[in-house]
Image (tube, helix red, strand yellow):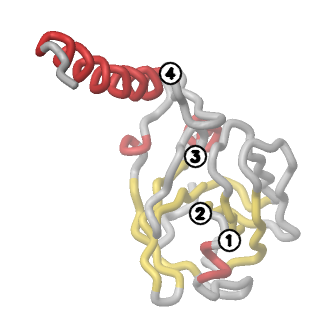
Amino acid sequence: MRFPMRSLIARFAVAVALPLAAMSFAATTAAPAHAQQMPAGAKQPGDFPRAKLTAGMFVIDAAVAANDADREQGLMYRTTLAPNEGMLFVFNENAVHCFWMKNTLIPLSIAFIRADGTVTDIDEMQAETTNNHCPKNNGVYALEMSKGWFSSKGIKPGMKIQGLPAAQ
């Protein structure tokens, strides 16, 4: 059976164009579940000051949130963290500082830390919830890492985090 050349070209064009068009449409219309754009005025992840911390033999690359605006934003709107990346919250008073996960798209673990670097409490937090996560003890730091990070590294209350910047 012979097809005219024009018919073969047309069929080939349709066979190639339809899947490409479908992929293009899907790429432009599909968004990750619960993805949110960073609001205008929000600090980009690379704009936070950084600190190199250590927990046992593990080095942590921590963004530092040391003022009200930075602490309020925290890791909101982020969709990923590097394997040893986190955020260190620095407070200017020794108190019970509670956290929640509103607009935080990734599950996190949090360690609450005293001024001397001692971890007092560790908690696991689900993404996009408004449950309060409060330590049992006063502290001046909190360190958020990817969910399960502390337990996977054997970091427990009573251990020390080194390299913390001075609390204000």
Return the residue at label 3: 75
Disc 2 + disc 3, Cβ < 8 Å: no
Mark 1 vs 2, N-terminal side: 1
Q: Which mark is residue 150?
A: none
Cα separation between marks 1 and 3? 18 Å
Return the residue at label 2: 146
Cα separation between marks 4 and 3? 26 Å
Q: Is residue 75 left or right of residue 127?
A: left
Q: Amino acid at mark 2?
A: Ser
Whole-percent x, y for residue 109 in the image = 68, 65
Q: Residues within 10 Å of mark 3 (few under 14, many from 20)?
A: many
Q: Amino acid at mark 4?
A: Thr
Where is the N terminus found, in terms of image quarters?
A: top left
Q: Residues within 10 Å of mark 1 (few under 14, many from 20)?
A: many
Q: Secondary structure at mark 2?
A: strand
Return the residue at label 4: 29
Residue sitting at x 83%, y 42%: 130
Residue sitting at x 64%, y 84%: 155
